[in-house]
Amino acid sequence: MELQQMRYVVAVAETNSFTRAAERCLVVQSALSHQIARLERELGARLFERTSRRVRLTPAGAAFLPAARQCLDAAERAVAEVAAAVGEVRGRLAVGLIPTVAAVDVPEALREFRRRHPQVRVSLRVGASEELVEQIEQGAIDVAFLGLPTTARPRGVVAHALARDRLVAVVAPDHPLAGERSTDLRTLSSEVFVDLPAGTAGRLQSDQAFAAAGLDRDVAFEVTSADYIARLVRPGLAVAMLPSAYVPHLEGVITVEVTDAPARVEYVIWSRSRTPAATAFLGVIGVPAQNADNS
């Protein structure tokens, strides 16, 4: 069994196509198919069901895939660890982030990181805070930026608090509240809201604040993108509550201070078994890898 065969299996599984997998792996399709067939003979089981219309994993293939990925990750990490031992940082860096991260200028941090370590390949994944924690635990990403209510803390990962921020109301330019210096949750409770999906960390901080004040609110619109929240606020469809440090990135909306607004804490998190690239990236953003608030 060879690592290249595992790479071919992963590529076919991710593209659902032998043709696209061969293009990704920069080999001719016949060579890729031949290597997978050799591997199947060695394993004594077919990894893929092939028809004229589709390719999909068999139960044996589904069982093989996670282990293949782990082997490839381990091989990649071995190369990175050897490079680190001689003073080089190589390999990959997978960074996860929530759409509203504001405590760190991520593009600028990545620019500096790439200047220092040009051999590292970087991938970015945008998601919800709870998803990012799971991906760190699973080893799918190396470092993540997330925001949580002050009542919650990241668990199962190493975490460092970056900043604390209060939410503000975001309204259309012609909204009655647009001319006010401040408002409160009771006033806002009569408005129609757009917010992140129920159950997410980004939604929870607002839900908890209204519940603690004994207030109900109407969340008529749920979206998964903070940028799209502004697109619904701008024409007056709804109002929103977003972190104050994030809203300067938005255009065509007005922000209003909320006197009893909830707060959130932004964290950077990583795995206990961090890679050399993750350690180097944490150094770029000024967080020594051993400096953690909890794990």
Image (cartoon, rainbow, N blue to C red):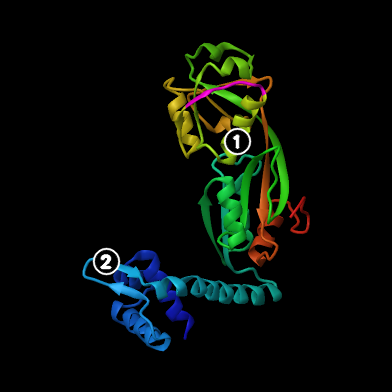
At mark 1, the secondary structure is helix
Q: Is residue 184 above or below residue 65?
A: above
Q: Amino acid at mark 2?
A: Arg
Image location (x, y in percent) of residue 133: 61, 52
Q: Which residues are magenta?
A: 213-219
**Among numbered discs 2 and 1, the one appearing first in the sequence:** 2
Structural crowding at the residue carrying mark 2, measured as other residues with C-alpha within 10 Å and reported as few (<14), some (14–19) or many (≥20): few
Image location (x, y in percent) of residue 58: 36, 72
Residue closer to the observer: 148 or 43: 43
Q: Which residue is mark 2?
A: 54
Q: Is residue 161 left or right of residue 73?
A: right
Q: Residue at x 57, y 57 (%)?
A: 135
Q: Which residue is mark 1?
A: 204
Magenta residues: mostly which secondary structure? loop
Q: Amino acid at mark 1?
A: Leu
Q: Residue at x 71, y 52 (%)?
A: 159
Tell me the quarter of the image containing the C terminus. Answer: bottom right
